[in-house]
């Protein structure tokens, strides 16, 4: 059942690719766009059908997205979210899949404090594999996997509910 018109995934490896496959399998969005750093990964993600469209430009990828999911390495997440927020539409929700929550959430909330046009909700799906890369992505990766979703004083309650529903729709607990 559709929850979003467009979802953008920044960093489409094992986790991002699995998110894309799960969204597509469950028809949770009309469009899934992947944002990539390397053309070789972009081509592999398209071949695996993890995304509908692919780009190497963050502004193009997040343009018009209702939900933006950042699945890049932890150290880069706050910087990427700050960049994505510049191009996100008003009312967009940004979440992440980083394993470190306190540092990411406090960094992102500080950088977005002046801009309330987008909403951030930190997440950490506790799923994975011994393999890395989009070619190992699986639509069922999140089924029965715990997922931590953060709530702070700055968290928009509607966005929090939508992020929780999103992860639940992927099978996460």
Image (tube, rainbow, N blue to C red):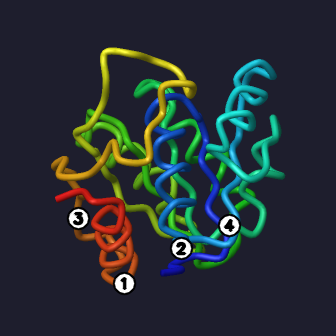
- Disc 2 element: loop
Residue 11 falls in image quadrant: top right
Q: Pointer 1: what residue? A: 158
- Disc 4 element: loop
* Disc number lying in front (4 or 3): 4
Query: Quarter of the image containing the C terminus?
Result: bottom left
- Whether the residues at callouts 4 and 1 have beta carbons within 8 Å, the answer is no
Q: Pointer 4: what residue? A: 65
The Cα atoms of the two marked residues, 3 and 1, are separated by 13 Å
- Disc 1 element: helix
The Cα atoms of the two marked residues, 3 and 2, are separated by 15 Å
In the image, 25 versus 41, the foreground residue is 25
Q: Left of 6 or right of it: where is 55?
A: right
Q: Pointer 2: what residue? A: 116
Q: Earlier in the sequence, mark 4 or mark 2?
A: 4
The Cα atoms of the two marked residues, 4 and 1, are separated by 17 Å
Question: Which residue shows up at 24% across the image and 56% down it?
Answer: 172
How many residues crowd around disc 4 within 10 Å: few (fewer than 14), some, or many (20 or more)? Answer: many
Question: Which residue shows up at 57% across the image and 57% down it?
Answer: 68
How many residues crowd around disc 2 within 10 Å: few (fewer than 14), some, or many (20 or more)? Answer: few
Q: Pointer 3: what residue? A: 152
The Cα atoms of the two marked residues, 1 and 2, are separated by 14 Å
- Disc 3 element: loop
Q: Earlier in the sequence, mark 1 or mark 2?
A: 2
């Amino acid at each position: 059942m559709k929850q979003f018109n467009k979802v953008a995934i920044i960093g489409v490896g094992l986790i991002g690719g699995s998110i894309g496959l799960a969204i597509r399998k469950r028809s949770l969005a009309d469009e899934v766009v992947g944002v990539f750093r390397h053309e070789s990964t972009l081509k592999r993600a398209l071949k695996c059908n993890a995304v509908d469209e692919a780009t190497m430009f963050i502004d193009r990828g997040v343009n018009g997205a209702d939900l933006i999911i950042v699945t890049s390495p932890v150290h880069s997440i706050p910087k990427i979210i700050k960049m994505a927020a510049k191009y996100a539409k008003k009312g967009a929700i940004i979440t992440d899949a980083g394993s470190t929550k306190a540092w990411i959430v406090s960094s992102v909330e500080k950088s977005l404090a002046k801009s309330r046009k987008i909403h951030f909700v930190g997440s950490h799906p506790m799923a994975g594999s011994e393999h890395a890369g989009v070619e190992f992505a699986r639509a069922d990766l999140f089924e029965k996997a715990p997922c931590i979703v953060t709530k702070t004083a700055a968290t928009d309650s509607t966005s929090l509910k939508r992020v929780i529903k999103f992860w639940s729709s992927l099978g996460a607990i």
